[in-house]
Amino acid sequence: MRQRARSTEDKARRAEDLLDAAEAMVLELGGVRYVTLAQVTERAGLHRTGVRRYYASKEELFLELAERGWGQWRDALKAEIALQTGLTPAQTAAVVSRTLIRLPIFCDLLTHVALRLEGDVDIERARRFKTNAFAARDEIAAALEHASSLALQQIETLVAVSVTLAAGFWQVSHPTATLAELYEQEPRWGHIALDFAPRLTAALQAFALGISQVGASADAS
């Protein structure tokens, strides 16, 4: 086990080590729902009681990981569309989908954030998460507004729908062992459930095209 962190820098590094360990365990076990705090602390090389110096609970640890995910999505999307302009609604949706698909842990966490994580921490931690998540969302929307033919309000709606669909589709496409066995017995159900990336992309492109046409119709009237 590692020695107790003595300095502010050491404490920050240990906190990051726990986040890295949590990410590794989620990927290894196949989802946030399978990971325990004891597994994370063991992977990080810390005593299980020592984690309380860095995160008050498992919920706070994973909320921190979700907050990191918002920053990762913002940075990936901004890098992908740098210097681009005039993206069509379908191209805009494809960028949003593609950058989300590359962040499977974030897609997984989006469901858990809404269900319990942000509600099971103290109010100040919830406030910090909301502040940083909304700041990242605003940066994403601003970057897309510059690169896309869609209006800002349409983009904000697209981003909101993207988060919701990514969360839902990810959970359906990563079934429990019981459901995986069921899909083997009933392949037609499994086919519908397991195509996360193409289904998300197709749904977001259809939605983006739809809101662009609604906007065009309103302008024409």
Image (spheres, rainbow, N blue to C red):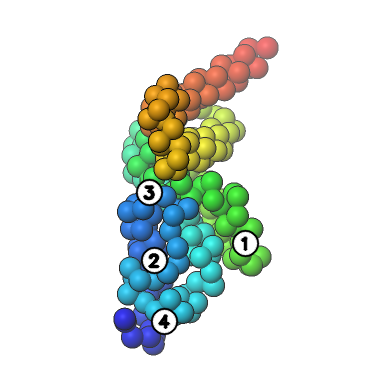
The answer to whether the residues at label 2 and label 4 have Cβ atoms under 8 Å apart is: no
Q: Nearer the viewer, mark 1 or mark 2?
A: 2
* Distance between mark 3 and mark 2 Cα atoms: 14 Å
Residue 8 tag number: 4
Q: Position of residue 84 (x, y in %)?
A: 35, 33
Image location of residue 71, percent across then percent down: 43, 53
Using the rendered view, name the quadrant where residue 151 is placed. Answer: top right
Which comes before the other along the chain, label 1 or label 4? Answer: 4
Question: Residue drawn 40% across and 28% down?
Answer: 185
Q: Earlier in the sequence, mark 1 or mark 3?
A: 3
Identify which amino acid the numbered label 1 is placed on: Asp
Residue 120 is tagged as 1
Residue to which mark 2 is pinned: 39
Name the residue type under label 2: Gln
Of marks 4 and 3, the one in the foreground: 3
- Name the quadrant containing residue 56: bottom right
Badge 3 amino acid: Gly
Circle number at residue 173: none
